[in-house]
Image: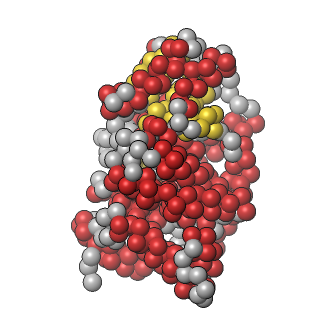
Amino acid sequence: MSRKEKQNRSIMSTVAAVEDRLFYRLDYVWPVKRLIHKAIMGIAHAVFPRFRDTILAEGPGAIKEVGPFIKEQGFHKALIMTDATLVKIGLAGKLTDSLEAAGIGYAIYDQVVPDPTIQNVEEGYALYKKENCDIIIGLGGGSPMDAAKVVSGRVVRPNRTTDNLGGLFAVTIPNLNWALKKPKHYPKIICIPTTSGTGAETTFSCVITNPDTGRKYTVNDLCVMPDYVILDPELTLGVPPKMTALTGIDALSHLTEAYVGDGHNKESDEISREGIKLVFEWLDKAVAEPDNIEARAAMMKAAHLGGKELIAGVTTYVHPFAHKTGAMTHITHGYCIGTYLPYFLEFYRPQADKRLAELADLIGVGQGRKTKDKAEAYIQAIRDMCAKYGVDGHIPEVADLDTKDFIRSVRTESFVYPVPKQISNRQIRKILKTVAGEK
Ligand SMILES: [Fe+2]
């Protein structure tokens, strides 16, 4: 590591530590927190239209469009970030066939692991430089897409290391610069999801793990925002029923949290309503009939809309709780989300009753009843859906977690999320006890 890199790393770790401490302290101060939410959502709503239309091609076989598109844009060589399974089952082959037919060169990095690591990003970045690539493709679930996005971050900011790309303050100044003038060396990113849930193809946030410390951290940077997205439902035909269900529940959470949270506006409401309708209409079919291409296409669209909500409306407490639980227990994201979502929707009442009742009307439950009953009917519909797919509202492993550390972590992360209601430490403990199955 050069002296400059060492200096950079030390400055950025200090900034990250200060940021964590500040967010944690300020999270207790509700008026400040609300003011920050207003500012963040103002920026998010202003930035969102710039990324509104990223779908390059959509529908069965859409992946074939990648090669001709890259050729037309004048790029020569693509770095493909993916995982070994997708190469083995032939999905990566569909992509390389399209590139070869168009005469586009490529290099494949197929070692991305679930919860992508710093090493994945650094190896992908080294391959990008060695092979003189000029465009990056992320093919897979959230992990390969996140790894691909952060490789782009490394290309744009070569003086930073992967572990100091994270943090909110750390990216503010570079992003202002980026907003004024797009760097010439900014490589385009194409994301091709092969599951329907994470919405990673729509955001400028990525989660990277440092295996040495076990710390998961978020990279938020406009330069990791995907430029183009391919939505090809054929790529999800092999996703097992359980994973289809849990990723669908994750998408439903993005859409619902954004709707009941404090960050919504007219545009985000429309996105949520369209996506929630799709989930309630098609998730059961996608699980029961894995080859039903119409159901797969609908769920892929719902997940994409859910991903858009991560900028347009943003999530609430459900996600920080699921992130921390997942990081400590290694239980899948969708399962953790399905566990916490009904508890938090209940917690947001009665403030969120009106919004929840609107969603009840949307999916046709609780008709003819009072607002508060309709709100309850919507939450019950989610509970029923989760229970049907084996998410029973309990994660016994939560009983073994360090509550103090848990509180600190969820407060630090959720500080910037536009939650509709402030939570106290006593209420956090109560939810954790319920999830753990304790009385
Ligand atoms: Fe999620």
Up/down of 399 relative to 53, above or below:
below
Image location (x, y in percent) of residue 281: 52, 61
Please, which residue is most extreme toward the bottom here?
370
In the picture, measured across the screen, residue 318 lies left or right of residue 421, that is left
Q: Residue at x 52, y 18 (%)?
A: 99
Q: Quadrant of residue 108?
A: top left
Q: Is residue 39 visible?
A: no
Q: Quadrant of residue 332?
A: bottom left
Image location (x, y in percent) of residue 146: 47, 39
Image location (x, y in percent) of residue 257: 55, 65
Number of numbered discs on residues: 0
Name the residue nearer the viewer: 10 or 317: 317
Image colouring: secondary structure
Q: Residue at x 60, y 55 (%)?
A: 309
Quarter occupied by the N terminus: top left
Name the residue nearer the viewer: 60 or 65: 60
Please, which residue is most extreme toward the top here?
103
Q: Is residue 140 visible?
A: yes
Q: Residue at x 30, y 40 (%)?
A: 212
Name the residue nearer the viewer: 84 or 150: 84
Q: Residue at x 41, y 67 (%)?
A: 385
Up/down of 1 relative to 239, above or below:
above
In the picture, measured across the screen, residue 70 lies left or right of residue 323, that is right
Image location (x, y in percent) of residue 230: 56, 35
Quarter occupied by the C terminus: bottom left
Up/down of 297 relative to 408, above or below:
above
